[in-house]
Image: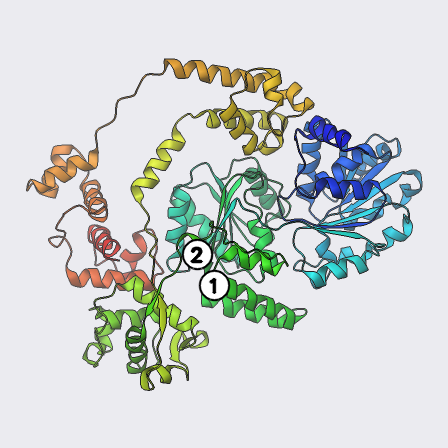
């Protein structure tokens, strides 16, 4: 089939002007009747590789997928493009299943999606069907070497025997060489042509952060992205629920998702996320595989993933529309220990432990992260990506021998009996209750590192652990122990190179500005709301109507005619006919309104008023009376003003000792965002006002 015909089909039915890399070649290979193995990253356009041939071939295309939710999404998307398709799975009644089977026999549909467990439903009608193509999605599930093995996939090899002249297309987003070989063998593919697309998702930024106060980091991150959908992957069910609750308390629409929840709750959460009614899902790693949501703008890993394949597939759920998206991975040694335990008890434990070690090496790396990921999948590149944390902030090394000696000496003086937080407090000469209770202030090296911040010491100690000079005894309440290598630094003069700590500063004014911008009625927001309303009426996900990328292009090009609207990527003939006029009307209305819009007056700054009154010598109580505000409100104003860097003396409200106690409690309580845990911790003996102001001092001095 000529390239011109294929391109015409692509635009007419799917709204795209050109194919993505490898798509056209894969399609031509299938049309020639050859078995094919396609390794394409998430968001790389795998679906077009079997959906377009299905329109060209005379019979029906069977698509085998393990993901029930994804089947519905893809069928909905095909229908909006005017393509007849259906799915058959366990979510339907027997009457519904029979209805679709009968219609398959009458050639009503071009594609049928079915789960491997439900494939037997078609056995009785196979002889009556003209099967032109068999597409097996998530093909890595057939291999025990892969990262998501599913027993039902092991029976799929019979399909090649049952339909020897029908081409089979096996697709997966992540598979190393061993898994690829196993897929070919298990599915009995005949001399398949293998395509490995580039795994370079340039639109995804890559970042790894230490898991220090990660809940606060996540809340700050999400607050900067109102109206942007995101997924947070967690290792345990409990963590998903706790984190979702903390996000809810901070004003974020977040839900937990894990296998322990009722099926109806899980389905409702997934639907709300797909339909943009829920901004954030905190989930175990299975979530998202069945979601074809193109406008996920960020993915966070609360815990270290167990292998690079799974990690890359999970971050690939962000930015599927090609627009910029962010990924953040938090790393802690507790995660490593837990994952090592899981891997050692599972199938192919040696292989899984080796893959976990590779994952850890990626997280600890000080070179371009994208190059590491690509090389793992056999793709070698010379240039650094410029879109990962290492490229954006290259580490600078310095002679950290004296710092290392101080830290290792402190561990020794404390008789290797304390966790990291206490060691940092000891080095900094903290005057908290725990230090004095243990009489540590009388030891020789107490306060030897008082000139270095708490955050920096924490990071230097983590580097020393990474370098092998000390280790965490997780089975002994996280005590830090010295390793034999420590002796070389303490007694033999070995030099230690450390890299400079770059602290990520959260600009709260920037968060506020981001929220304000998002609240403004930009054309994108107007089109997004229109898309949402249409999606609600049609009971399909919003991205099925148009992707964010299509809306952004509409915002840029401002199409005001059918011809101009058809030029937008993702707009085919069916979508022009269904939705074109409504979107064109919205764009015209916006342009007219913009010309008439008047400037709004700025509101006065309530914080600035409080600051001016306080600096003039008026007491807090008098300010509250004068401004007709509660005392607690004025205290919260002062706390924020202090954190933001204003010159305010808070010592009249909270003592240095109380600040030290609050800092220690903050560590012990794992950085709660609410004040009540502190209030309870101190047996209600420290007032909420003191807690609020004391924490403000701790925050500014970090």
Residue 391 in the image: x percent, y percent?
44, 54
At mark 1, the secondary structure is: loop
Residue closer to the observer: 396 or 165: 396
Query: Does residue 154 show up?
Result: yes
Q: Residues within 10 Å of mark 2 (few under 14, many from 20)?
A: many
At mark 2, the secondary structure is: helix
Q: Which residue is mark 2?
A: 390
Using the image, determine if residue 481 lies above or below residue 65. Answer: below
Q: Quadrant of residue 665?
A: bottom left
Using the image, determine if residue 465 lies above or below residue 359. Answer: below
Q: Is residue 661 left or right of residue 44?
A: left
Residue 534 in the image: x percent, y percent?
58, 24
Q: Is residue 330 left or right of residue 437?
A: right
Residue closer to the observer: 489 or 159: 489
Q: Quadrant of residue 22?
A: top right
Asked if the residue at tag 1 contacts the one at tag 2, i.e. Cβ–Cβ closer than 8 Å, the answer is yes
Q: Which residue is mark 1?
A: 365
Query: Does residue 93 show up?
Result: no
């Amino acid at each position: 089939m000529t390239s011109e015909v294929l391109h015409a089909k692509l635009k007419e039915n799917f709204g795209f002007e050109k194919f993505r890399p490898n798509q056209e070649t894969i399609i031509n290979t299938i049309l020639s009747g050859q078995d094919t193995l396609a390794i394409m990253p998430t968001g790389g356009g795998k679906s077009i590789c079997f959906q377009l041939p299905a329109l060209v071939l005379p019979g029906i295309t069977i698509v085998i997928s393990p993901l029930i939710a994804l089947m519905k999404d893809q069928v909905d998307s095909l229908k909006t493009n005017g393509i007849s398709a259906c799915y058959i799975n366990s979510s339907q009644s027997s009457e519904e299943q029979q209805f679709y089977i009968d219609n398959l026999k009458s050639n009503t549909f071009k594609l049928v999606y079915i789960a491997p467990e439900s494939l037997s439903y078609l056995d009785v009608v196979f002889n009556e069907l003209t099967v032109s193509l068999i597409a097996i999605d998530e093909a890595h599930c057939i291999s025990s070497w892969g990262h998501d093995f599913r027993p039902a996939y092991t029976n799929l090899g019979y399909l090649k025997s049952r339909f020897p002249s029908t081409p089979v297309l096996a697709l997966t987003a992540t598979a190393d060489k061993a898994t690829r070989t196993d897929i070919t063998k298990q599915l009995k593919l005949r001399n398949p042509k293998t395509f490995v697309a580039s795994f370079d998702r340039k639109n995804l930024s890559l970042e790894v952060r230490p898991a220090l106060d990660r809940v606060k980091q996540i809340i700050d991150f999400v607050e900067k992205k109102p109206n942007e959908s995101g997924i947070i992957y967690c290792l345990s069910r409990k963590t998903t629920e706790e984190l979702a609750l903390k996000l809810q308390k901070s004003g974020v629409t977040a839900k937990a998702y894990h296998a322990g929840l009722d099926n109806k709750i899980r389905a409702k959460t997934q639907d709300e996320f797909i339909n943009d009614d829920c901004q954030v899902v905190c989930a175990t790693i299975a979530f998202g595989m069945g979601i074809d949501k193109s406008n996920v703008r960020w993915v966070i890993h609360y815990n270290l993933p167990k292998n690079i394949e799974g990690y890359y597939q999970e971050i690939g759920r962000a930015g599927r529309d090609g627009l910029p998206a962010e990924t953040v991975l938090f790393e802690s040694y507790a995660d490593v220990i837990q994952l090592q335990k899981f891997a050692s008890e599972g199938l192919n434990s040696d292989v899984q432990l080796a893959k976990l070690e590779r994952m850890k090496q990626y997280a600890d790396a000080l070179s371009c992260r994208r190059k590491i990921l690509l090389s793992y999948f056999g793709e070698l590149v010379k240039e650094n990506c410029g879109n990962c944390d290492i490229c954006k902030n290259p580490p600078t090394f310095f002679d950290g021998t004296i710092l290392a000696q101080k830290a290792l000496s402190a561990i020794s003086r404390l008789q290797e009996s304390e966790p990291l937080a206490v060691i940092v407090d000891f080095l900094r000469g903290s005057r908290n209750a725990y230090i004095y209770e243990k009489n540590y202030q009388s030891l020789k090296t107490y306060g030897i590192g008082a000139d270095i911040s708490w955050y920096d010491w924490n990071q230097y100690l983590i580097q020393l652990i990474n370098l092998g000079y000390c280790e965490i005894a997780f089975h002994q309440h996280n005590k830090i122990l010295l390793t034999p290598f420590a002796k070389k630094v303490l007694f033999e003069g070995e030099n230690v190179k450390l890299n400079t700590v770059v602290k990520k500063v959260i600009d709260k004014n920037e968060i506020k500005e981001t929220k304000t911008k998002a609240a403004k009625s930009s054309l994108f927001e107007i089109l997004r709301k229109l898309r949402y309303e249409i999606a609600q009426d049609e009971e399909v996900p919003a991205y099925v109507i148009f992707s964010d990328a299509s809306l952004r292009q509409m915002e840029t090009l401002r199409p005001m005619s059918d011809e101009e609207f058809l030029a937008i990527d993702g707009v085919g003939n069916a979508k022009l006919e269904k939705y074109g006029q409504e979107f064109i009307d919205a764009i015209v209305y916006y342009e007219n309104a913009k010309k008439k819009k008047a400037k709004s007056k700025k509101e006065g700054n309530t914080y600035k008023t409080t600051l001016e009154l306080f600096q003039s010598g008026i007491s807090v109580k008098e300010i509250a009376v004068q401004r007709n505000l509660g005392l607690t409100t004025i205290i919260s104003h002062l706390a924020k003003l202090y954190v933001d860097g204003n010159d305010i003396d808070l010592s009249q409200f909270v003592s240095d000792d109380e600040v030290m106690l609050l800092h220690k409690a903050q560590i012990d309580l794992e950085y709660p965002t609410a004040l009540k845990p502190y209030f309870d911790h101190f047996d209600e003996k420290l007032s909420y006002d003191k807690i609020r102001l004391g924490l403000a001092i701790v925050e500014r001095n970090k």
